Amino acid sequence: MKELLKEALIYKARYYIAVFFLLAGIVAIIAAIMNAIVDDNSGGSGPGGSGPLLCTPGELNMEYIDSKFADLGVFTGKQNVFIESATTSGIDPVLLMSIAMHETTYGKSPAVVNKNNPGGLMRADGKGLMTFASLDEGIQFMAANLQRLYISQGLVTIEQIGNKYAPVGAKNDPNNLNTHWIPTVTRIVNSFGGLSANCDQIASGDYAYPTAPPLIVTSSYGMRTHPLTGKPSTMHQGTDLACSIGDPIYAVDSGTIAVAVKSGGGNYGHHIIINHGNRFTLYGHLTAVSVRLNHNVIKGEQIGTCGKTGRVTGPHLHFEIQTGDIYGTREDPWPFLQNIGSRKEESDLHSEADESTGREDEYK
């Protein structure tokens, strides 16, 4: 009887051990698949990507342009109208195309279908959108308008144009959709093969924006009352920048990924640390991490998306400057951020934003 009981216990133990290793193997396989999927998304800045802005002086990539205009709603086959209108007005054809694509949801919005209005252009009296006799006329007017109100005034980069064309915090944008204007237009530009003019101005500046400009600081580096615990005199070791869940997060400078936490991460949540040689930068509370360990990134490359993972009250980017080592000595990021023309705003996220309709002239 004892022998039978002993054999039964041994059999049961072997069964549970086998089940344990089977489950462990399944978990390992799933983890490997997930890591492979994430690593496959570490990509790229090629055409179609939303990484650094592509720009080749004087060159239009007609292969990409023609392929895109093969199926673009009312814009299908209209690439030459855009190119001729832009050339006549002295502006970049790709810039004109990309803004029109974004403003009309790729040639399918009611404004362009019913009013031949490719740029969301308002009437002089502010009462609704302009109507044009033909789509060609609307494209020509949009090109001239872009030259007169933006390019001729020195507003040549996507960031400069976007801050006036679609200002964050405008009264006519209660859902803050304007925060997506700059990154979306940038992505569309790259899908066309990149810009062909003003490349020097576009490449200027020592560092790239970590979030879509203008930067809005919601909590500075230094002593503060902790937003979760209410504890006074708590050291905040970075700078918090406003962003919405899913917004792209960019590398401020070129470097190598030293940390890429895609799950967990403690107080930081999902986060990334980039080694720039003389310093480290940390990007915390991300929803997604789109780079892998030891991956080389370039200034302006998208590395993840904004989120609210870790110990937070809401979505934002926690940005740190670290020296000495990973998670080493923290420095105030503000002097660093000032080198990219950021805007410091405490508490009131839009205290300096344009509170008008967002249109500083009779059209846009």
Image: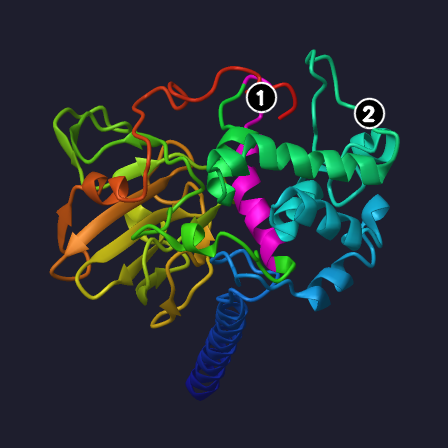
Marker disc for residue 359: 1
Give the residue type that dot 2 points to: Thr
Q: Is residue 181 magenta?
A: yes
> CA separation, marks 2 and 1?
17 Å
Image quadrant containing the C terminus? top right
As drawn, 185 above or below 327:
above
Q: Secondary structure at mark 1?
A: loop
Where is residue 54? Give x, y as percent.
52, 60
Q: Residue at x 19, y 59 (%)?
A: 279
Where is residue 131? Give x, y as percent.
82, 25
Can residue 166 be seen by looking at this rendering? no
As drawn, is 178 to the left or to the right of 231? Answer: right
Q: Is residue 50 magenta?
A: no
Where is residue 14? Give x, y as percent.
46, 83
Task: Decide whether the magenta segment is chiefly helix, strand or loop.
Answer: helix
As drawn, is 97 to the left or to the right of 294? Answer: right
Can residue 141 be seen by looking at this rendering? yes
Where is residue 359? Give x, y as percent.
58, 21
Give the residue type that dot 1 points to: Arg
Marker disc for residue 28: none
Q: Secondary structure at mark 2?
A: loop
- Residue to which mark 2 is pinned: 131
Determine the image quadrant of residue 281.
bottom left
Dot 1 alpha-carbon crowd within 10 angstroms: few under 14, some 14 to 19, many 20 or more: some
Q: Residue at x 76, y 39 (%)?
A: 139
Q: Residue at x 79, y 49 (%)?
A: 81
Task: Name which of mark 2 and mark 1 comes first in the sequence.
Answer: 2
